[in-house]
Structure formats: structure tokens, C-alpha cells
Image (cartoon, helix red, strand yellow):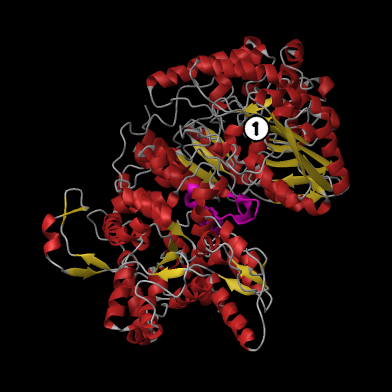
């Protein structure tokens, strides 16, 4: 028997000698492709990124020579397991991702398989054209994957499936033949026509009619080869899941896009009522009839009242015409409530709710995990209501839960079900349910797959839908195209059992010892990692892809590098394999995981933009904590992780001027940066000569302000002197005091004195003799952010516990705590209670944290900000977007006359990230995505807003422009207003 190692070595050598693209057999490349978006996992031997069709051909030849199977892979968003394999994975996203040509007159495009759908849509849009099918993964799914799965999307009621949009294909068969499948037997492999002509009766009787079942995606579309169907070889190839040939190019049809659209959101009492109504709306010619129930909708989504909704989109040559058609649909529908929206931005926001369902559905309302496997069954649209009732009954009989949603107008239902795929009993129930559901779908005249293909999840059950004779015909057709079973074996024909190769089987059964509490995952790090189901929203190439407002963040490092390794999904996959221990074998010491996490900016964008709430910043901190336990850390961890200590020491010595002078000396600065692990391209920020708290103390003395408070007469608010405001930009603190007091608030700083009492027991109780001595210890509160971001979690816990001790009088007082630096506010609001999950004071502190704008909104609601009346440019801070939200900030800007939107994305500096050696290029690439172009294009009178110190530093160092905190902008406007008042002017306005 040939040793697997010898096969791998020979295969790798052969591929490297023959292929011009990348050949990767390392642990990282293999780990990144063990899974798609399904329940299944297979470990490949290696990954090849071909440069062109010739590379594909020689790669197939080498694999055939070694008897190794091949799997074609696009965006890796397949839900049935067909994008995983044990041989060689062909990754088409790296090089074969071009739009070759677009002919607006012929309404035709030539595309490579790795082209992302949105790139085609963007190119077609200026010509009033579009590609008809549009899955919810349109921002990252590829045309090759769509053809392989015969994908559909929300507009299939108008424009059909991908097969309806395919004209001609370029394919390399399993035998290496170069074929051009099209109509009238064009591009058919030898023997296919003979096979079909001998089985005409089976093809005409055993294949459900597409007119009755438009979402019949299961099995091979061999009936497309019937003479009455045009003997369309290209159409029959669609949906073959990479088992017949490898696609290298496609000619696709485009459709005329409506000039205007309107969206009617129809509310029903429940999903069954919505399902019953869907088919009746098709007569009105809608572009979509999508359905979803309340379980998948986040609070405050803006939908009309009801328990389930249909999203019915209409088109027209004008907004009025599209709206009139939508209103006609509303009049014809028997609804609980309805909403018609013609504004494109609002429509995008509402559609985002539906598109995010594929991720949102992976968690039940109580937080329990839910999984694909029966993601997209389809029945004739008129049978949908009855099918859903029977489906619900079957779920109940098995003690399972799931929330259906999807393409109600086509009778196609998506659902994630809370299968227990971790225990033997749960997996057995998964199999029983799957078998019974297949029978139920067939009894309603349906298809086991209505969009995503069969893969391993359903192929075993195809005989129940087609019968044994048709399935044997599938096997014979596969043999014609791929006699050696080289291409994606185990899919569609001779499939692996649906309950084998489950990706959860390799994970540890006992919780891993971790530092963070992972409250949403029951304290289980494995469960936190399992959150990533692979829908790959992190692989979008534009920051605005994540939200209707265009302010998305996730995932800046992927957009900068284009590498799966540096996406949120890629990092989650590596962590999964780290826990599994098969491909990544060094556990927490893994260099593969460390390398992937190295370019994670800890921006926390995934925490909000990922539909399942993956929080890679927390996972990174956890990993670094374990990886460096008992080991020497990188210099940057000491230089920047301990920044609060160093800055405080400089302030105590009153040495800021000296440090600034030394930093201005080139050789000394270069030496300091090299020793501190700081990028040589970076300038060392200047320290403030007078820290904020020293200014505060001096001001109290000079102004005669009463101890412990400011000049305002209203409620007391505690202004948190974060490290950056305290030592690097005290002007922000001074401005905040000015504005808060102007708003009538009584500003105070946190306590700075500890009684010198020894802790006992739980670390919080105090020794009884403490009261005997008046010894005091001065200290300053700290959020621990720099320690957390560098994974120094033991130190972070110590700092945070000391902070909680210091802040106990504030917690007892009930006063809000104003934090000016968004990253520090986010750390206190989320990281602190998750790290100190055993200390209830951390949650109490988190509940008190307010941003500057939130404080004004909640505690000075009738105050009128000064009128700035200028356009604004800048970027919403990553942590503001991901953790804090910016509703109050938007309202404050509007009230002050700061017009315009801030951009999304990340500034790229992200605390210590952009300062660390090796990160400068990625850091600047992130800034160049949105922030710097927006600032360069701004008018001279525009206000450049940047509430975060990192954002301001990045702006100044890369563009020479100074950004300002909104507090500074308002304080400046107050000074101007005061000056006008002295000259006889007056301010005015109303409550904001």
C-alpha cells in the first residue's frame, strides 16, 4: 500500500512543477478549506489557486495521475458540503475572478468562475442591466459556485434560476477534455447523447416539471437534454456541483433592470398565513415574494406589526409606477398591516433584515445553536402553506425547533434547526428527522433542494424523490463525464451518509479553560468558535456591504489583503482546527493561528456586522493570552500594552517635554521604535505637557470650584480620564468639560484614592483592621484596553479589579460615567464584564458607561447645541459602530448642523495594531479604503470628525489633516457663540 505521505509529497511536487498559480499544502491552507457553510468537514491534501484554464487542465492531469480527487471551490458558502473534499481544492477566487467582457447590446457577459456576483452587477448597472439570480450571499458568492449549485435568490419569481441565465460554458471534463456546453448537444462529452436517447421515458416521467416546481434543484437536470427542451447541455450542467466537469468560463445572459423599484412589506398573523397568500400574489408580476417570521427579526427593525411578513418588490419605469404596483399588491392582499417603501435607502435597510436571516437563523431566540442540513426544500408554491403546517408538526414530533423563511413565491423554504450534532443520540435523531422530512417533501410534490444543491446533506435521499431508476441514470451520466470519479466524489451519486463527516465530531466535548466568560455561549469557547457557520459576510470587498447606512466595518484586514486567512471566517476556521487538533496540532501554541490573528485589527466590526455575532477581537485576546503564557512576548506588547504605566510615569516625573524632545531626534526615535516593536514608518505621538487631570485640579483651584464637581448645577456626571485623553489629547477632555457644563451638568472626575486595605477571600472583601489605619494609595481608573488587545488578560483583570475598587463610591451613587474615547467605552461596556464575569461590579460599571453624545441626550435633553452649520467628514469609530452604536451621535450632529454622513470601514491604526512592526502596509491600506479619500475630497469648510485618538493620529500621520472630537467642535462653536454674544449676537434653537 502506498503511504499517504508519499502520495502527498509526489502530488505536491507534480503540481508545483506544472501549475503557474499558487500550490499550498501547509496546515494553514488546508485548515482554511476543511469546511464550507454546511455541517460537514473534510481535510484536503492541498489547495491550488490556478491562474487560468491551462493551469486547471494541468492540475487535473496531475491529480488524475496520482488518483487524487479534485473539488472546485468559489466563495465557500455552499450549505450542503459540496465545497469540501479530501483531495485537492481548486480555489478560483484568487486569480480566475475576472469579468472577461460585457456586451450591453447583446445583454451578455463572459465571466470567470471566481468572479463575485456583485462585481458583475456593478459592471452591468450603468447599462441598465443585471444578472437575474441574486442569492443573499451576493456580496461574496461566485458565478462558478452559482452555476455549480444552480443558485436562485430572491428575484427568481421574475428571472428564474442561474440555469435560466446561462448561455454557454467552458468546461474541462474528468478525462481532461475541453468542452463548450451549449444548446443542441453542443459540448456534450462522448456517449452522453446515446445515454439520454436510450432513457427518454425515464426523463419524461421521473423528473418533476419545472413549470409546476420552479425550484427543482436536486439531482442532475438531465431532462434539459430532452429534444423538446433544446438538448441544452449547458443547462443540464448547472447544478452538478462540480461532479461532471470543472468550469473555467461562462457566457451568461443579463436582464433589463427596472428603472425604479418599490417594496411592499405585508404583515400577516403567522408564517402559515403568509405562505398561503404568497402564490396568489404572483399574478401581479412581482420581482420578489420573500417571507420571514418574527423569530428572525431584531427588535426595532421598522417592520409593520405582525407575526410574519412577505417582502414583495415591484418594478417600473418610474418611482410612481413602481409604487403604484406595490400599492396594488397591498390592496389585493389580506394583511394585518402593510408598508410601502419607494426610497432606495430605506429599501436597502429593510432588505438587509431578510438577507441577514441566513446568519441570524443560526441561533434560536434563547441562544441555542441551529444548523443547516434541511436549509432549502421546495414544494409547488400552491402547496407551501400545507407543507409548512406539516413541517411544523414534524419538528414538534422530534422535539426540534426552527424558523422557516425564504422564497415563498417559489415555494422554497430556508430553515436552520436546533439539531444536537454533538452527541450520538442527537446525530441519530438528525438522521431520522432527515429521512422523514424527505418523505414529507416528496409527498407534497417537492424537491429536497430548492437552491443550494444536495451535496452530502441530501444526496443519500435522492432515491426517495426520483426513484432508483433515475438515480442509476445519474450514476451513468456521471460516468460519461468523469469515468474515474475524479471530480468531487461522494456528491450527488454514490454519496457519503448524511450523518458522517460532521464538522462538530472533532471538537472537544469538555469546555476549554478560558479567561473570558463567553456569556452568550455558556462559557464554552468551542461554542463561541462554532458561531461561524461560514456564510462569509466577512469576505465582502466593500465596507458599506454590511449595513443599510453604508457604515459597515467587518473585515478590514480581508479587504486589505484579499486572503481568506485574514477574514473573520478564516480565523474562525483555524481556531476550529486548533481545537480539533488534526491539521493544526500545536493547540494554543499554534503559529498558524498566530499568523492569521496577527493582522486582526481587533476592530470588533465582526461583533456587529457578522450575522451570528462572531467576536474575533475577543478570540484574539484569548488566544494571545494562552499563546504567550509563561513565555516572552513581542516587544510591542510591553511597549504599547503597558502604555498607561509608561505615560503615567512620564507625567509623574513631569518629563513630557524631555520625552518629546528626545523623540524628535531621528537616531533616538529609530532606536526607541526598534526596541519597542514599533513600525519604523510611524511617528511617535507627542505627549501633552499638562495631563488632563492636572489641568482639572488647577482649574478647580483657580476657579474656586467646589471639591468633587464642576460648574454645572444639574445632575452629576463622572468624566472618565482615559489614558489617551489624560496624557495625549487633554484638549478633548477640556472641551468635554466646557460643553457638559454649558449643558447644565455637574462634572466630576472618578476617585483617585484607595484605602490601603489587604483583600481577603474573594479578592474583594477587606481585612477588618483596615479601618485602624488612615494609609491611602493614589491610583487612576483604567479600562484595561491596551492589556486586553495584546492578550495580557491576567494583567487586565488586575487593573480592572483595582478600577472597580476605586469606582465603588461612583457605583453606589448612580451617576453616569462619560467616556470620551470610544474604544475605552467599548472595553468597559463589553470586555470588562466578560473578562470579570465572576464580579458583579463589572456589569454594574458597564451599565453606567455613556458616550459623550449619550450623556447629553439622556441627561441634558433640553439643551441646545451651538449651531456649527458646516459639512462633516470622517469615519465612525470601529468600536462605536460595533459595540456602542451611534444613534445619539447622529442626533447630536444633526442638532448642531453638522451635515453629511461619516464613512464606514476602519482607520487602520486601531490602537496598537497600526504601530506594530509589520502592520504599516495593511494599516495604510485600511485608511485608503474610505477614510483618506473622503478627507481628501472634503471641502475646505468641512469639519473632520474623529472621536478616537487612533483615528486622529492616523489622519494626521497619513494626510497631514487634523481631526477633532465632536466635543472639541462643539466647544469651539460655544466660544464663537460667546464671542458673538459679547459683540451683540445671540444663539438660539430648540431642544435636540
Residue 912 seen from this side: yes
In which quadrant is the C terminus drawn? bottom right
- Considering only vertical position in the picture, is 137 above or below 422? below
Tell me which segment is drawn in magenta: 540-568
Going 73% across and 34% down the picture, which residue do you hit? 337
Residue 745's x, y, as percent? 48, 68
Q: Residues within 10 Å of mark 1 (few under 14, many from 20)?
A: many
Would you say 153 lies left or right of 841 here? right
687 lies left or right of 81: left
What residue appears at the point 65 percent right and 51 percent down from the top-left corner? 548
Q: Residue at x 55, y 66 (%)?
A: 927
The location of residue 275, given as percent across then percent down, is: 70, 24
Relative image position of residue 196 (x, y in whole percent): 74, 17
Q: Quick check: is 543 in the magenta stretch?
A: yes
Q: Position of residue 829 (x, y in %)?
A: 42, 54
Q: How many marks?
A: 1
Above or below residue 918? Residue 581 is above
Residue 256 occupies which quadrant of the picture? top right
Locate the N terminus and report the quarter of the image it occupies.
top left
In the image shown, does 892 or 410 lie closer to the viewer? 892
294 or 215: which is nearer to us?
Answer: 294
Using residue 773 as the reference point, say whether residue 85 is left or right of it: right
Q: Which residue is mark 1?
A: 292
Q: Residue at x 48, y 57 (%)?
A: 603
* Above or below, comparing residue 882 to residue 4 in the picture: below
Amino acid at each position: 500500500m502506498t503511504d499517504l505521505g508519499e502520495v502527498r509529497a509526489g502530488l505536491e511536487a507534480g503540481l508545483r512543477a506544472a501549475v503557474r498559480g499558487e500550490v499550498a499544502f501547509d496546515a494553514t491552507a488546508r485548515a482554511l478549506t476543511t469546511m464550507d457553510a454546511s455541517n460537514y468537514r473534510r481535510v484536503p491534501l492541498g489547495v491550488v489557486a490556478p491562474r487560468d484554464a491551462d493551469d486547471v487542465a494541468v492540475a487535473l492531469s496531475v491529480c488524475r495521475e496520482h488518483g487524487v480527487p479534485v473539488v472546485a471551490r468559489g466563495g465557500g458558502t455552499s450549505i450542503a458540503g459540496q465545497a469540501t473534499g479530501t483531495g485537492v481544492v481548486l480555489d478560483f477566487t484568487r486569480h480566475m475572478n475576472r469579468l472577461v467582457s460585457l456586451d450591453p447590446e447583446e445583454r451578455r457577459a463572459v465571466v470567470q468562475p471566481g468572479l463575485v456576483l456583485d462585481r458583475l452587477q456593478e459592471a452591468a448597472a450603468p447599462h441598465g442591466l443585471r444578472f437575474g439570480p441574486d442569492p443573499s450571499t451576493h456580496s461574496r458568492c461566485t458565478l462558478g459556485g452559482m452555476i455549480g449549485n444552480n443558485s436562485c435568490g430572491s428575484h427568481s419569481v421574475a428571472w428564474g434560476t442561474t440555469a435560466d441565465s446561462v448561455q454557454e460554458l467552458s468546461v474541462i471534463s474528468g478525462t481532461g477534455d475541453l468542452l463548450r456546453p451549449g444548446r443542441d448537444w453542443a459540448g456534450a462529452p462522448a456517449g452522453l447523447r446515446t445515454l439520454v436517447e436510450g432513457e427518454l421515458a425515464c426523463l419524461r416521467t421521473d423528473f418533476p416539471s419545472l413549470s409546476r416546481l420552479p425550484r427543482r434543484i436536486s439531482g442532475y437536470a438531465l431532462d434539459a437534454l430532452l429534444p423538446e427542451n433544446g438538448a441544452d447541455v449547458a443547462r443540464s450542467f448547472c447544478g452538478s456541483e462540480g461532479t461532471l466537469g470543472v468550469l473555467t468560463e461562462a457566457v451568461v445572459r443579463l436582464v433589463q433592470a427596472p428603472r425604479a423599484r418599490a417594496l411592499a412589506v405585508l404583515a400577516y398573523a403567522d408564517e402559515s398565513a403568509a405562505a398561503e397568500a404568497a402564490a396568489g400574489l404572483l399574478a401581479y408580476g412581482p420581482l420578489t415574494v420573500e417571507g420571514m417570521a418574527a423569530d428572525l427579526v431584531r427588535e426595532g427593525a421598522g417592520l409593520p406589526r405582525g407575526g410574519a411578513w412577505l417582502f414583495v418588490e415591484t418594478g417600473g419605469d418610474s418611482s410612481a409606477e413602481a409604487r403604484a404596483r406595490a400599492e396594488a399588491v397591498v390592496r389585493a392582499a389580506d394583511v394585518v398591516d402593510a408598508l410601502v417603501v419607494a426610497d432606495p435607502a430605506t429599501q436597502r435597510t429593510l432588505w438587509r433584515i431578510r438577507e441577514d436571516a441566513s446568519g441570524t437563523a443560526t441561533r434560536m431566540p434563547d441562544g441555542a445553536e441551529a444548523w443547516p442540513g434541511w436549509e432549502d426544500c421546495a414544494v409547488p408554491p400552491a402547496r407551501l402553506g400545507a407543507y409548512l403546517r406539516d413541517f411544523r408538526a414534524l419538528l414538534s414530533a422530534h422535539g426540534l425547533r426552527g424558523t422557516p423563511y425564504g422564497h415563498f413565491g417559489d415555494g422554497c423554504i430556508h430553515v436552520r434547526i436546533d439539531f444536537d450534532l454533538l452527541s450520538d443520540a442527537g446525530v441519530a435523531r438528525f438522521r431520522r428527522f432527515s429521512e422523514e422530512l424527505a418523505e414529507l417533501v416528496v409527498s407534497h410534490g417537492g424537491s429536497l433542494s430548492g437552491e443550494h444543491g444536495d451535496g452530502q446533506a441530501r444526496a443519500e435521499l435522492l432515491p426517495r424523490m426520483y426513484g432508483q431508476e433515475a438515480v442509476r441514470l445519474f450514476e451513468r451520466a456521471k460516468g460519461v463525464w468523469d469515468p474515474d470519479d475524479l471530480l468531487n466524489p461522494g456528491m450527488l451519486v454514490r454519496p457519503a451518509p448524511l450523518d458522517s463527516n460532521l464538522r462538530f465530531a472533532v471538537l472537544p466535548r469538555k469546555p476549554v479553560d478560558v479567561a473570558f466568560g463567553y456569556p452568550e455561549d455558556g462559557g464554552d469557547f468551542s461554542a463561541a468558535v462554532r458561531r461561524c457557520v461560514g456564510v462569509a459576510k466577512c469576505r465582502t470587498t466593500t465596507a458599506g456591504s454590511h449595513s443599510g447606512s453604508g457604515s459597515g466595518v467587518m473585515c478590514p484586514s480581508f479587504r486589505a489583503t484579499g486572503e481568506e486567512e485574514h477574514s473573520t471566517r478564516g480565523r474562525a476556521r483555524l481556531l476550529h482546527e486548533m481545537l480539533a487538533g488534526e491539521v493544526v496540532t500545536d493547540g494554543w501554541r499554534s503559529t498558524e493561528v498566530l499568523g492569521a490573528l496577527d493582522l486582526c485589527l481587533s476592530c470588533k466590526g465582526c461583533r456587529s456586522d457578522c450575522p451570528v455575532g462572531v467576536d474575533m477581537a475577543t478570540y484574539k485576546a484569548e488566544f494571545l493570552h494562552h499563546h504567550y503564557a509563561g513565555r516572552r512576548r513581542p516587544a510591542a506588547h510591553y511597549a504599547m500594552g503597558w502604555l498607561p504605566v509608561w505615560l503615567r510615569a512620564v507625567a509623574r516625573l513631569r518629563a513630557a517635554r524631555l520625552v518629546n524632545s528626545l523623540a524628535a531626534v531621528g537616531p533616538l526615535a529609530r532606536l526607541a521604535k526598534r526596541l519597542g516593536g514599533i513600525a519604523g514608518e510611524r511617528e511617535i505621538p507627542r505627549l501633552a505637557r499638562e495631563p488632563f487631570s492636572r489641568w482639572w485640579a488647577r482649574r478647580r483651584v483657580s476657579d474656586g470650584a467646589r471639591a468633587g464637581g464642576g460648574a454645572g448645577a444639574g445632575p452629576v456626571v463622572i468624566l472618565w480620564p482615559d489614558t489617551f485623553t489624560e496624557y495625549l489629547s487633554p484638549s478633548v477632555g477640556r472641551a468635554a468639560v466646557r460643553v457638559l457644563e454649558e449643558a447644565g451638568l455637574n462634572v466630576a472626575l472618578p476617585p483617585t484614592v484607595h484605602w490601603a486595605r489587604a483583600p481577603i477571600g474573594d479578592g474583594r472583601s477587606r481585612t477588618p483592621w483596615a479601618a485602624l489605619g488612615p494609609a491611602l494609595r493614589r491610583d487612576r481608573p483604567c479600562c484595561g484596553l491596551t492589556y486586553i488587545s495584546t492578550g495580557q488578560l491576567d494583567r487586565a483583570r488586575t487593573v480592572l479589579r483595582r478600577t472597580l475598587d476605586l469606582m465603588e463610591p461612583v457605583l453606589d451613587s448612580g451617576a453616569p460615567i462619560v467616556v470620551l474615547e470610544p474604544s475605552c467605552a467599548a472595553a468597559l461596556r463589553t470586555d470588562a464584564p466578560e473578562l470579570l464575569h465572576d464580579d458583579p461590579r463589572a456589569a454594574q460599571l458597564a451599565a453606567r458607561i455613556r458616550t459623550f453624545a449619550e450623556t447629553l441626550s439622556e441627561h441634558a435633553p433640553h439643551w441646545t447645541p451651538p449651531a456649527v452649520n458646516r459639512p462633516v467628514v470622517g469615519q465612525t469609530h470601529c468600536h462605536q459602530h460595533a459595540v456602542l452604536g451611534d444613534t445619539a451621535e447622529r442626533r447630536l450632529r444633526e442638532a448642531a448642523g453638522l451635515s453629511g454622513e461619516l464613512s464606514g470601514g476602519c482607520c487602520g491604526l486601531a490602537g496598537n495594531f497600526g504601530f506594530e512592526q509589520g502592520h504599516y502596509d495593511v494599516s495604510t491600506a485600511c485608511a485608503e479604503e474610505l477614510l483618506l479619500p473622503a478627507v481628501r475630497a472634503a471641502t475646505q469648510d468641512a469639519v473632520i470628525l474623529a472621536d478616537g485618538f487612533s483615528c486622529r493620529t492616523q489622519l494626521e500621520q497619513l494626510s497631514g489633516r487634523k481631526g477633532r472630537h465632536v466635543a472639541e467642535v462643539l466647544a469651539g462653536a460655544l466660544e464663537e457663540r460667546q464671542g458673538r454674544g459679547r459683540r451683540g449676537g445671540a444663539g438660539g434653537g430648540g431642544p435636540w
